[in-house]
Image (cartoon, helix red, strand yellow):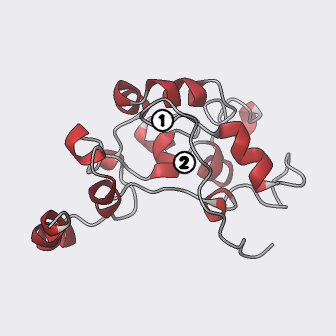
Amino acid sequence: MRHLHLILLAPLLALVAPTPARGGDLVGPETCRACHPAAFAAWADSPHARALESLPPARRADRRCLSCHAPAAEAGQAGVSCEACHGPGRLYAARYVMRDDELARAVGLVIPGEKACLACHTEHTPSLRGFDYQQKRALIAHPDRAGAPAAPPPTAPAQGR
């Protein structure tokens, strides 16, 4: 019975299934901050929030660099914000959706793991050497809704390592 709402919503979800992010699908980190202030604070103090600033000025318009340092630059977002890792929030940002973990994931919330990090943190990244997922994951861990430290996601085998 608990999952009946997902069964009933399945046809609707098929119409609004997550697609690659478009500027209109992004809600921005301030929207996330409203419900997740501790996670926002952890992000704001992180290198991800300042990823665009970490590039030399000559590289800040280079699409190859922006794909990792500011993936939503075309939507006016600098750095690597919440939605770069958790997916565009338009469909899951509403409080009633976020209160239901299954529904939030069904409409696009991503719980990123090692594979997501390795999309940018590779052995070919100019300024990174020896990316260790477990070590780096601890540096960006942010509290859950109740304020408790987030448990690391299950580790999937790394692809192409």
Q: Residue at x 51, y 48 (%)?
A: 84
Marks 2/1 in contact by CB < 8 Å: the verdict is no
In this rendering, position of residue 57 left or right of residue 74: right
Residue 1: % across, % down: 14, 67
* In-front residue for pair 45/68: 45
Amino acid found under the numbered disc labelled 1: Gln
Residue 90 visible in this rendered orientation of the protein? no
Residue 60: % across, % down: 66, 38
Secondary structure state at the residue bearing disc 2: loop
Secondary structure state at the residue bearing disc 1: loop
* In-front residue for pair 26/37: 37
Q: Residue furthest front?
A: 1
Q: Residue furthest left?
A: 8
How packed mark 1 is, by other alpha carbons closer than 10 Å (few <14, some 14-19, many 20 or more), is some
Residue 116: % across, % down: 60, 60
Query: Badge 1 is on which residue?
Result: 77
Amino acid found under the numbered disc labelled 2: Pro
Query: Badge 2 is on which residue?
Result: 71
Residue 55, above or below 17: above
